[in-house]
Image (cartoon, rainbow, N blue to C red):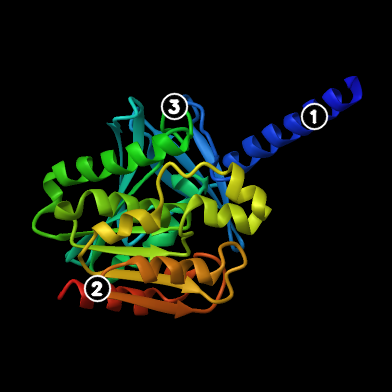
Amino acid sequence: MIKNSAFFIIVLFSLVLSSCSLNKMFLKPTKMAADASSATLYIEKDTVTIQYIGDQYHPLFIRNGDDTVSFNYTTESVMFESTSENMLNGWMLTPKDVQPKATILFFHGNSGFLTSQHWAMTRLLKYGFQVFAVDYSGYGFSEGKATRKNVLKDGNSALKYLKSRADLGDTKVIIYGQSLGGHLAAVVAGQNEDDIDGLVIEGAFSSHKDIGIEFAGFLGRIFVKEQYSAIESIPHFHKPTLIIHSTEDDVIPFKLGEKIYEHANQPKELYQIEGCHICGSRLYSEEIAGKILKMLDL
């Protein structure tokens, strides 16, 4: 009887650990200390140092130790409050030589932070977009703890903050999310249809349980908590939707992108690409920009 009880306790403990591990796999933030003054990135053959200036953490990019990098866009760093009760860090990327026709609210994936993730959107700037990218709670300089509940609160708060900005002008607003951010984009769009004009989802999973199954089989179905999901939310969105997914994606299977597409309303398009996970905005920037402008009638 004692042996059976011990075995039961061991099994139960193992299941609890499995559950915790599965639910933690969704968020892998890089956290910056509030007093951090710099970070280093390795971009191809260059070493780029980012110096953060002031209480808004304005980024100054320096290549190979001493050359200040000038881009064809400006970067404004801001801190704003979320309903998660955390102050969040966001970057507004504005092209210098192109008048923005549309504004993108960008939700990045489950790892890294703004400094490493914002590059995904920079190639779209020259096609007539400005981009507001945001770090979720517990990422980068954003305060608080990285949880899925906070991610949703932060996504909704980022949209509300963006809509309050004077420089939005009369540009149309779309949400563009990659991976975890693509899943989030579907949920935020479903809850805020009147505030946006379109939705772009790249390399996203259809639900937390669906991707849990891919990683852990039946244990993913049992132990992954759903909380909210793309396929439950996207039917509430009735504006133009572009879903991008690579058939070669080795992180989130193409079939999960197809599943989101199946649950989306018309007008919608499934753009099937090749290449690595969430590399579409880098490898197919011209094609994606063209599709977005077309779906917005711009």
Q: If the image is split into quadrants, where does the C terminus sit?
A: bottom left
Q: What residue is rendered at 48% in x and 34% in y? A: 146
Q: Which residue does the numbered mark 1 point to in the structure image?
A: 8
Amino acid bearing label 2: Gln
Q: Position of residue 170 (x, y in %)?
A: 8, 58
Q: Hey, which residue is sitting farthest front in the picture? A: 1
Q: Which residue does the numbered mark 2 point to in the structure image?
A: 266
Amino acid bearing label 1: Phe
Judge whether residue 109 can be spotted in this image.
Answer: no
Spatial CA span between label 3 and label 1:
37 Å
Q: What residue is rendered at 20% in x and 65% in y? A: 239
Q: Position of residue 242 (x, y in %)?
A: 32, 71
Q: Are marks 2 and 1 in contact (CB under 8 Å)?
A: no
Q: Callout 3: 10 Å neighbours few (<14), some, many (20+)? A: some
Q: Which residue does the numbered mark 3 point to in the structure image?
A: 144
Q: Secondary structure at mark 3?
A: loop
